[in-house]
Amino acid sequence: MVEHYPFELQPLPYLYDALEPNIDMETMYFHHAKHLRTYIDKLNETLAPYPQYHAWTLERLLLHLNELPGEIREDVRKNAGGVYNHKLYFESLTPVPRELDGALRDAIFLNFGNYNSFQKTFSEMALSLFGSGNLWLVSDNRGKLAILPLSNQDTPLAIELYPLLNLDLWEHAYYLKHQNRRADYIANWFPLVNWEEIGRRYQEALIANALQNMP
Ligand SMILES: [Fe+2]
């Protein structure tokens, strides 16, 4: 389904309590039903008087921010970014563990040595991200991986990197359960990553890049 204006709050692919005890039900509920909904409502409000953008997808809005009128560009950047990043975040998690394998496993081993050193580097960078933002695993246009911290609701799309996985490091993602203990949230988040879904995104990135690089 291609999403465009008016954007709607889609249900999570699992129940609010499905990620317990790693992420508690209350946090999931507020994060999805309140925080994500607010981004959706604000994005719709911003776009309402501009019917020429009503057929644009989230990706198109974020990839072509500079084509939007100056008076709405910043609001679209924040709110379309907020919708896109949360959608990716929620869809990256699963109550049923999924193994890392295939091309993404090979790329993680090639880039980081092994899974444990990837997890260690990712955790350290998540811990040191200043303020609010997301830590990303991204692919460049050759399939090379990188870990990238971005502030607020910025997305890798805007800098032509392909988003694979994001860890939401806004306090609303963990404060109810862990308060200021961000390290506990990070350690509890890792076992929930749906590597099957992240591997699928990596395959999509490789295909998109192969098509783009065709002579
Ligand atoms: Fe969030």
Image (cartoon, helix red, strand yellow):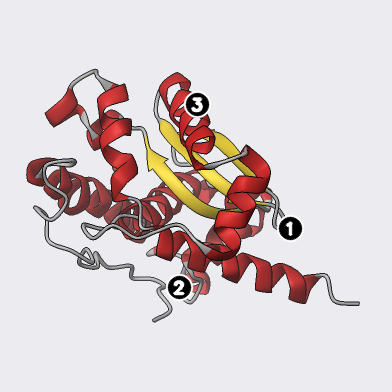
Residue 130: x %, y % from top left: 45, 20
* Amino acid carrying mark 3 in the image: Met
Within 10 angstroms of label 3, few (less than 14), some, or many (20 or more) residues? Answer: some
Residue at the image point whose x is 61% and y is 58% from the top: 63
Quarter of the picture holding the N terminus: bottom left
SS category of the residue bearing label 1: loop
| Few, some or many residues within 10 Å of mark 2 (<14, 14–19, 20+) | some
Q: Position of residue 100 (x, y in %)?
A: 45, 57
Q: Which amino acid does label 2 sit on?
A: His
Which residue occupies the foreground of this view, 192 or 177?
Answer: 192
Disc 1 packing (10 Å; few <14; some 14–19; many ≥20): some
Q: Which residue is drawn at 23% across and 54% down?
A: 37
Q: Which of the 4 quarters of the picture holds residue 141?
A: bottom right
- Number of numbered tags placed on the structure image: 3
Viewport quadrant of the C terminus? bottom right
Real-space Cα separation, disc 3 to disc 1, in angstroms = 23 Å
* Residue positioned most to the bottom: 1
Image mark for residue 210: none
Residue 26 rendering spot, x and y as whole percentages: 8, 42
Q: Could you say whether the residue bearing mark 3 is in a helix, strand or loop?
A: helix
Distance between mark 2 and mark 3 Cα atoms: 37 Å
Sequence-wise, which precedes: disc 3 or disc 1?
A: 3
Residue 185 falls in which quadrant of the image? top left
Marks 1, 2: nearer the viewer: 1
Label 1 near ligand 1 (CB < 8 Å): no
Query: In the displayed structure, does residue 161 sit left or right of residue 48?
Result: right
Q: Residue 141 carries which label?
A: 1
Identity of the residue drawn at 59% across and 48% down: 108
Residue depicted at 78% across the width and 72% down the height: 212
Residue under pointer 2: 54
